Image (cartoon, grey):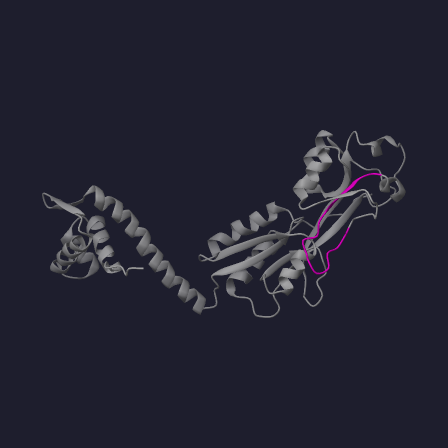
Amino acid sequence: MKAPRITLDQWKILQAVIDHGGYAQAAQALHCSQSSISYNIARLQEQLAVPLLRIEGRKAVLTPIGEVLLRRSRQLTADASQLEVLAQQMQEGWEAEVRLVVDVAYPSQNIVQALQAFKPLSQGCRVLLREEVLSGTEELLQDNAADIAISALNITGYLPIELGSITFIAVAHHQHPLHQLEHQLSANDLSAYMQVVIRDSGERQPRDIGWLGAEQRWTVASLATSAEFIRAGLGFAWLPEHVVADDLAIGLLKKLPLQTGSIRHQPFYLYSQKDRPLGKAAKTLMDCIQANALPRLACSPS
């Protein structure tokens, strides 16, 4: 790649001439001589071989080409300044990126609220967000591929921070045959019908949490797909209340009348990487996640 001939200082001089209304004003703002301003502008136009300014009376005015290049130069100098700030922040322990992995069952609304709170505090730090299912979250944390994790699992060797609980409800379409049995349902009743389960995204020890052991099951990759299957009457499933609340309210889905376990309260936990100390950005993001955690839910009858 050819090295640029124009320096950042030359672009800043052009910006000063326009922002302050002329060569003399730019010289005063930059604490240099007017002859230095004139020389650098002339040199800039010579190196680019295009006219950037024209003089109208006593005022320097941008040419159409100059307007385009000035806009691009502002982004260039801003990026350079941000790069210097980033280097200083990293020197002070403020990392450039935080890797956050979240179990897909955790409400996205709570994550959005946490990131909204983090953004004005982030100092330009990027957040790399991944969604996983069950042990997929655990494996990324253990493999040092995540700095922070939100999981429903008790991960061995890591200290959990409680984030509250999510209510899972056993549901099916309101016309599903299970609703026609007219008695409280047992595990044997459920085993005769299709259960929709979400595939564990982990590779080492995937779990079948929630599966009743029946041969009739469809395995899907996401909560959204599972919910669509249930809305279409293709089976039954335990789904988070925040996912099916509207469907229950309008009667499209109905809670299954189980003898026990129709409602499950699943706690979620916040974990951090233990193999190395967290930087300031990761700690700040953890604070934001805790401040926007789940409510402490009272137990509801099954």
Of residue 183 and residue 267, the one placed in the foreground of this image is: 183
Q: Quadrant of residue 185?
A: top right
Q: Point out residue 184 in the picture as x, y percentages from the top left corner.
A: 89, 38
The image shows residue 240, relative to residue 93, as above or below, that is above
Q: Which residues are magenta?
A: 193-209
The image shows residue 251, relative to residue 27, as above or below, that is above
Location of the N terminus by quadrant is bottom left
Compared across the picture, whether 69 is left or right of 152 comes to left
Q: Point out residue 291 in the picture as x, y percentages from the top left corner.
A: 59, 54
Compared across the picture, whether 272 is left or right of 87 comes to right
Give the residue drawn at x 73%, y 56%.
206
Q: Point out residue 79 in the picture as x, y percentages from the top left corner.
A: 35, 56
Farthest-out residue, left: 57
Q: Quadrant of residue 135?
A: bottom right
- Looking at the magenta stretch, what is its main secondary structure? loop
The image shows residue 184, relative to residue 159, as above or below, that is above
Q: From this viewpoint, is residue 260 visible?
A: yes
Of residue 108 and residue 24, the one placed in the foreground of this image is: 108
